[in-house]
Amino acid sequence: MLNQFWATATRPYKVLVFGSMALIAAGIVLSIVGNASQNQGVAFAALPVIGAGLVLHGAGRVIRGRTVIRMLRK
C-alpha cells in the first residue's frame, strides 16, 4: 500500500508539491537574476516567492500525512 509513495498520493497533494517546487524555482531564478544584475529590488522580491513555496510544501506534507493516517486506519 505505502510502498509506492507517489502512486498512492492524491491529486491535490501532487498539484501542491509541483506548485511549491515551481514557486521555489521561480524564486531562486529571481534571486540569481537580481543578484547578477545588482538589482536589490528583484533580489528581495525573490524572498517572499521562495517563502510561499516553502509554506506550500509544508502544507503538502500535512495533507499527505493526514491521507496516510486515513489509509492506515482502514
Image (cartoon, rainbow, N blue to C red):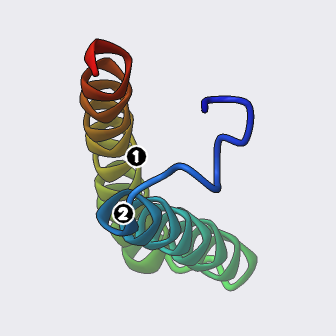
**Residue 34 drawn at (x, y percent):** 58, 78
**Residue 31 drawn at (x, y percent):** 59, 68
Q: Residue at x 34, y 45 (%)?
A: 60
Q: Which residue is disc 2 drawn over? A: 16
Q: Tag 2's secondary structure?
A: helix
Q: Earlier in the sequence, mark 1 or mark 2?
A: 2
Q: Which residue is disc 1 drawn over? A: 57
- Tell me the quarter of the picture where residue 59 sits: top left
Determine the CA span between mark 1 and mark 2. 7 Å
* Quadrant occupied by the C terminus: top left
39 vs 45, left or right, is right
Q: Nearer the viewer, residue 10 or 24?
A: 10
Circle 1 crowding by C-alpha within 10 Å: few under 14, some 14–19, many from 20: many
Q: Is there a contact, CB below 8 Å, between mark 1 and mark 2?
A: yes
Which amino acid, by three-letter code, is at mark 2?
Answer: Leu
Q: Tag 1's secondary structure?
A: helix
**In the rendered image of this protein, does residue 58 appear above or below residue 52?**
above
26 vs 7, left or right, is left
Which amino acid, by three-letter code, is at mark 1?
Answer: His
Counting the numbered discs, the total is: 2
**In the rendered image of this protein, does residue 33 appear above or below residue 67?**
below
**In the rendered image of this protein, does residue 5 appear above or below residue 69?**
below
| Furthest residue in direction front, as rendered | 74
**In the rendered image of this protein, does residue 27 appear above or below residue 72?**
below
72 vs 2, left or right, is left
**Residue 58 drawn at (x, y percent):** 34, 36
